[in-house]
Image (spheres, rainbow, N blue to C red):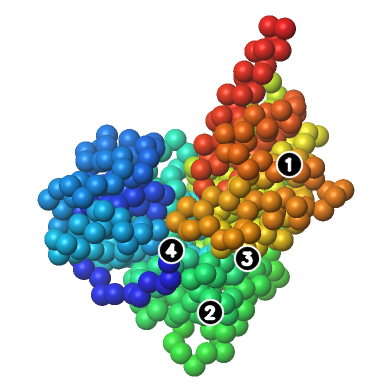
Amino acid sequence: MGLITPRELVGVEELAPVHFIAIGGSGMNGIASAFLDLGYEVSGSDRQDSKYLRGLQERGARTYIGHAAEQLGNAKTVIASSAIRDDNPELVEARARGLRILHRSEALGALMLGRRGVAVAGTHGKTTTTAMIARVLTELGTDPSYLIGGAFLGSKTGGHIGTGEALVVEADESDGSFLQYPAEVAVVTNVDPDHLTNWGTAEAYADGFVRFATKPELKLLIVSADDPGAVELVKTLRESAARVPEIITFGTAPEADLRLTDLELTGTGSTFTLTDTRRGVGGPVRLAVPAKYNALNATATYAVATYFGGETAPDFSEGAVRAALGQFGGTHRRFELVGTVDGVRVYDDYSHHPTEVANMLGETARPAAGEGRVVACFQPHLYSRTRDFWREFAVALEQADEVIVMDVCGDREDPIDGITGALVSDAIRPGTANVTYQPVWDEAAPTVAAIARPGDVVVTIGCGDVTKVAPKIVDELRRRTAEAREA
C-alpha cells in the first residue's frame, strides 16, 4: 500500500459531484455524509451492503453494491482510500475519463479548509477520542463538525457538518494520511509501532508523529504523559530546534498537566478525579464507558473542550466540561453489546493490535465478566500484521479463559506463505487460556456457542468480518437454548 504524499488541498466547492469507492467503509461514510450535509451530489459503491450504506441512501446518496465503471455517472471527482486496488473498475474508468482522483485524506482535508481543525491521532483510541470530543463539544452547545472512523452507538454515520467553528477528525497514521490535515489542535493518544509494511521501521513510524506534531499551522498539541512512545515524542519536540506548538500533557503521571487520579472501574463505567495542575482546577468525572483507557481519552477530551469551550460555548465552565464527559455513550464496535442469551452476554470489539486486545480484555471484558469467564473469538487482521505481531497477539489473548482463533482476514492484502491464524493459536501457552483454532469462518459461531455457558462474557475481536460472527453467535445460542427447553 505504501505512504501517501501530502498534496495541496482543493476546496470542496470544486469537487462535486463526487463518487466514493467503498463508500460504506468506516473511513469513508462520514466524509460522504459531510458532502451531503453541504448539499453536494454524492454517489458511491461498496462490495457489500451495510447499515452505513443504507444510512447514506436514506439521506439521498446514490449507492451501489459491487463495483462497475458505469456507476461513476456524472461524477467530477472520485474519492478512494489506500485499500482500493489499482485495477478497481471504477478507478480504471476514472483515469480513462481524466477525472480528478483524490485519496480519502484529501477529501477530508478539503472539508477542514476554513474551519478550526482538531486532528486526533495515535495508534489506539482515535475513534473513541474523536467521538468523545465531538459529543462533549456538542453538549457544550458549540455544534461542532466531525468526521469519525466509526459511528456513535445508535447512529448510521460518523460524519456531520455543524454550524460551529470546530471540525474534529480522526487522523489516520497507517498510510501517512494524518500529515495531510490542516489542524489547529492535535491530540496524540499514544505512539505504538504498527503498519510497518508502510512505514518500514518503528523509528520511521515515530518520526511520522514528529512531522505531524510540527506542522506549521498547529497551535496546540495534547499528548499522553503515560505512553512511552508519546513521552519520547514530547522529549524529541522539546529538544528540537524547530518551532513547536504549545504542549499539554495528560495522564496518570505525576508530571502530567492534566492529571487523572482516584480511578475506580465500575463495570461498564468509571469514576476518577481530573485535575488541571496548571490552573489548580478540576474535580470528579463519571463516565458511562469502561476501562482506564477511556478515562485517559476523556482527559484528552477535556483539554480540547476547555480550549474551545471558553471561546465559543454559551454555557461553558470547567465543571460543565467534566459533566459533559459523562454524556458520552460509546461508539460502534467498541465493546458493543450485541445480545444476551440465557446469561451469556455477547459483545463485539474492533481491537486489532496486540496492545488494544490486551487492554480490552484486561480492562473491559474481565471486569464486565465478574465471576464469569471471558470467551474471546479473535480474527487476525492482515497477513502482514499477523506476521509482525503473532507472538504479541498470543500473549494478549492469554488474558481470556477461552480463546477461539479464526483464520486471517486478509482484506486488501494477498496471502503470505505460512501466515495463518494457527500461528497465533499455537503460540498461546499451555496453562493460560484454553484455545481452539477454527479456520472455517461459518463454523466460528457454532464453536463459540458450544463453549459459552451462563455468566460468560463473549467478545468477538478484530476489524475484519468477525463483526458478522457476533450476531450469529447470538442466534446460535438462542437456537441451542430453544432446543434444550424442548428436549
Residue 38 location (% of width, % of height) = 21, 50
Q: Going 67% across and 45% down the picture, which residue do you hit? A: 405
Q: Are marks 4 and 2 in contact (CB under 8 Å)?
A: no
Q: Is residue 239 above or below residue 149?
A: below
In the rendered image, which residue does mark 4 sit on?
171
Residue 360 location (% of width, % of height) = 66, 49
In the rendered image, which residue does mark 3 sit on?
388
In the rendered image, which residue does mark 2 sit on?
204
Q: Is residue 78 left or right of residue 357?
A: left
Work out whether residue 190 can be spotted.
yes
Kind of residue indicated by mark 2: Ala
Kind of residue indicated by mark 4: Ala
Disc nearer the start of the sequence (4/2): 4
Kind of residue indicated by mark 3: Asp
Q: Is residue 29 left or right of residue 454?
A: left
Disc nearer the start of the sequence (2/3): 2
Disc nearer the start of the sequence (3/1): 3
Work out whether residue 321 can be spotted.
no
How many discs appear? 4
Residue, far right: 431
| Foreground pick, 10 / 140 | 10
Q: Are marks 3 and 1 in contact (CB under 8 Å)?
A: no
